[in-house]
Amino acid sequence: MHPRIPLVLALACSLGACAPKALPTPAQQVPSEEQQLSVEVGALARRAEALLEEQHRLVWVFWTEGRHVDVAGTYAGQEDLFSLDHIRKIDRLRQLTQDPREVRALTALHSHFAGEYLAHALAESNDASANLEASLTFTVDGRELRYRDLERLLANERNAAKRRALYTEATPALERLNQTLRRKEERARELVRELGFASYEAFGGELRQADLGRLSVLAEEILQATQAPYRVVMERLSQRELGLAFKDITRADIPRLFRSREVEDAFPKGESLLKAQATLAGMNLALGDMKNLQVDSRDLPRKSARPLALAVKVPDDVRFSFKPGSGALHQARVLHEFGHALHLAFTRETRFELSRLGNPTVGEAYSSLFEDLLEDPVWLEEHAGISGEQRAQFLATSSAHKLYLIRHAAGRLLYQLELHRRPDVDARALYREVMSRTDDIPMRDEDAARYLVDQEDFFQSADSFRAWFLAGQLQAQLKARFGPAWWRAPQAGEFLKGLWARGNALSAKEVAEAIGEKGIEPDVLLLRLGTTLQVPMRLDLQGTEDTPGPTAPGPEGLPTPPAAPTASTSEGP
């Protein structure tokens, strides 16, 4: 060995080179894709929540005071929030998630972001159609009238010939609007594919949280089962209200046909809020004790006449706007919005995505439950002093109208599904075919001209369709548990608060199951309507949740989000 090596080694050791080496620290654990996405998506949800709160504060100012607000300005600095990249990240996290509750929350968030993306991309088309509709006019007997006033004018016109003249003269104005709506529809189809969905129907299925194919089966069954009773009911009503045979009426007569004049005096100005509060008090739902629910009853000149329930933050800051009005329709709107307000105010769900996002069917069902009090003979006598023949006639009209609305929603759903499944179909001819059968009124050319105006974005009828049926089941359960005047029972209030506490975390089907039903079924509502109208209606269901049917596909190239019995993301009716 070289004699200098030990000296070198000694020197090196003296400088620490021979010191024992520290044990290596374990490599820092790399977060999984799911963990990384959870952090990113959580931040996106918080931004969306803050933005929604800011926007709702502005909407409240506009609604209650009529002041100009700049809701569009709230997107400044948020241009990247509702991007395709973020939407895909939310969807990717949904695919990686196994927990059903998380899947539901992510589905709600995904729908919200996709909806905002579409709204921004279609803003120009939406503004154009809204501005055009607001400016459309037509002339009758030398008078220039606004197209948006047509329904009111038809309802108030006694003379059938004048109603038809109003309707006919308003039709040419629609052609300009149809061109704008057609361009918007084409653009919406393109945007849905940009979002990664295979079709317009596929996106609609996610947005509505429903199996639209199965729901269309139910819609067809309802049209068939109610066809004969509907004709009997409409014949009676046409003769009584219009002095015409049903075969002789046109669509111009519909607004007048369902105008409830018998009970208007029972709902004088200034009493609708008192009637609603008295109803809620019977269930120990004292509005004055609810610090998180603000009721604005100021009668300001620029305040919107329509009641509104609005949540700035669920459940801490819920607001209800009310302006004194009169009539049965105003009372119905007050009760409807209170249904929304109570659902929001009693929510105990802390997850933003499950408290205020998601499909609105459940919230609409609670609203319809309270609105339906105007079709309850006991409530009408107790809170409005309506009884005897006056009550019988009013109930006959309101129940006939509900049957008409159910059938009309079924027809619109069938029309729009067929329209989007067959892109090359003649839309006007399809509308004429489906809706003439639905309304059982021959369709003239001026009726068919409304084939685009009568469309709705992404199958909205699916929500009201199911909400009406679920509300009927809720009402029947409340009557069975707490008596015919269930609104007098404090236990009914506790029962409802238990449901409201879940926010939007339960699907419509799960709410039905929670109250002891098998799922959403229309029989209860149809039985009630048939009893009131004295025409039996029976439905042999094929399109229920238990019937196998096509599932709404998820984004193209990706598996449908996992479903579980307690938290399915795409369900039957």
Image: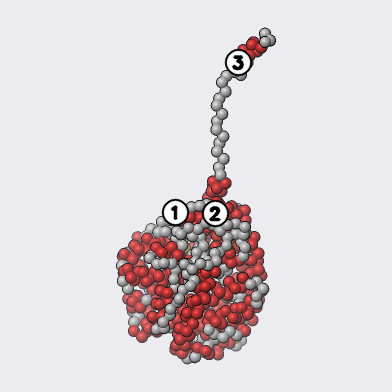
Q: Is residue 494 left or right of residue 61?
A: left
SS of the residue at dot 3? helix
Residue found 51% across the figure and 70% down from its top: 215
Q: Within 10 angstroms of label 3, few (less than 14), some, or many (20 or more) residues?
A: few
Q: Position of residue 293 (x, y in %)?
A: 41, 61
Q: How many numbered discs sit on the rendered protein?
A: 3
Let me know if residue 128 appears in the view: no
Chain-order first, disc 1 or disc 2? 2
Give the CA distance from mark 3 to mark 2. Answer: 58 Å
Give the CA distance from mark 1 to mark 2. Answer: 20 Å
Q: Nearer the viewer, mark 1 or mark 3?
A: 3
SS of the residue at dot 1? loop
Chain-order first, disc 1 or disc 3? 3
In the image shown, does 546 or 154 lie closer to the viewer? Answer: 546
Q: Is residue 237 left or right of residue 184?
A: left
Q: Is residue 31 above or below residue 219?
A: above
In the image shown, does 97 or 135 lie closer to the viewer? Answer: 97
Identity, as a three-letter code, of the amino acid under mark 3: Cys
Identity, as a three-letter code, of the amino acid under mark 1: Thr
Residue at image mark 2: 94
Identity, as a three-letter code, of the amino acid under mark 2: Arg
Query: Pointers 3 and 2 in contact (CB under 8 A)?
Result: no
Give the CA distance from mark 1 to mark 3. Answer: 63 Å
Let me know if residue 508 appears in the view: yes
Indicate which disc residue 350 carries.
Answer: 1
Furthest residue in direction right, as rendered: 2
From the image, which quarter does the N terminus lie in?
top right
Q: Position of residue 148 (x, y in %)?
A: 56, 77
Q: Is residue 215 left or right of residue 394?
A: right
Residue found 37% across the figure and 83% down from its top: 392
